[in-house]
Image (cartoon, rainbow, N blue to C red):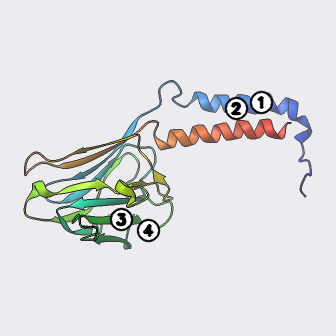
């Protein structure tokens, strides 16, 4: 029943320091002094192989990209986190730029296409003859997509900074680097701890 006091709720003044101690103890386990930076790298080698190097503590559940110099994309059939039916490549997005678009989705909520701390092959791009004409572009450029990277629950992951490293030779790899400070898992843990502390103080008023 709404408003019914739970057993032990009358001991609010005694519970407060105990719960506060638990929260502070939890926070002491987190990197409070210097937020942990982590990166996600999207790599496309000269063969067109597209991999994600994920150093976050959370997996990647989906990726939305734009590209130039790409004519097709084949998802990696061995990556069981990828839903082929829910992923798509569009050769021309129709805005006059000649850019293509790639959307790769997971098979279900909570599933990663690139697990935390791993390097995962996502698929292979088919490309035009000139390898230097190829590039991958963050999907949220000009608001085309909500974000480039998403967690396994398909929440957007917004990096602190993004850098592109185009190939300088025909045998070089194109690299797109996303830096997160603090990384999403740490930020979420801090937020949850703050909510627990706030909730404790609110109930005891």
Q: Quadrant of residue 188?
A: top right
Which label belongs to residue 107?
Answer: 4
| Foreground label between 4 and 3 | 3
| Furthest-top residue in this view | 33
Which residue carries the number 2 mark?
22
N-term mark: 4 or 1: 1
Contact, mark 1 vs mark 2 (Cβ under 8 Å): yes
Q: Which residue is drawn at 36% across and 65% down?
A: 104
N-term mark: 3 or 2: 2
The CA span between labels 4 and 3 is 10 Å
Residue 80 shows in this picture = no
Which residue carries the number 3 mark?
104
Kind of element beneath mark 2 = helix
Kind of element beneath mark 3 = strand
* Quadrant placement of the N terminus: bottom right
Residue 137 shows in this picture = yes
The CA span between labels 3 and 2 is 40 Å
Bin the neighbour count of mark 4 within 10 Å (Cα to Cα): few under 14, some 14-19, many 20 and up: many
| Foreground label between 1 and 3 | 3
91 versus 27 height, above or below: below
Bin the neighbour count of mark 3 within 10 Å (Cα to Cα): few under 14, some 14-19, many 20 and up: many
170 versus 102 height, above or below: above
Kind of element beneath mark 4 = loop
Total numbered badges shown on the rendered structure: 4
């Amino acid at each position: 029943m709404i408003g019914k006091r739970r057993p032990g709720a009358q001991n609010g003044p005694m519970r407060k320091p105990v719960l506060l101690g638990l929260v502070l103890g939890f926070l002491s386990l987190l990197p409070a002094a210097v937020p942990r930076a982590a990166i996600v790298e999207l790599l496309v080698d000269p063969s067109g192989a597209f991999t994600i190097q994920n150093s976050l503590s959370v997996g990647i559940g989906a990726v939305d990209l734009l590209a130039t110099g790409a004519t097709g994309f084949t998802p990696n059939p061995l990556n069981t986190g990828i839903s082929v039916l829910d992923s798509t490549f569009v050769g021309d997005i129709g805005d006059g730029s000649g850019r293509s678009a790639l959307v790769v989705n997971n098979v279900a909520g909570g599933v990663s296409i690139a697990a935390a701390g791993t390097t995962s092959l996502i698929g292979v791009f088919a490309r035009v003859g000139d390898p230097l004409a190829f590039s991958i572009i963050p999907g949220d450029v000009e608001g085309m997509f909500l974000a480039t990277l998403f967690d396994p629950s398909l929440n957007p992951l917004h990096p602190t900074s993004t850098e592109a490293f185009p190939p300088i030779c025909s045998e070089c790899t194109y690299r797109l680097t996303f830096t997160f400070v603090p990384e999403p898992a740490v930020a979420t843990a801090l937020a949850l701890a703050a909510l627990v502390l706030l909730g404790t103080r609110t109930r005891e008023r």
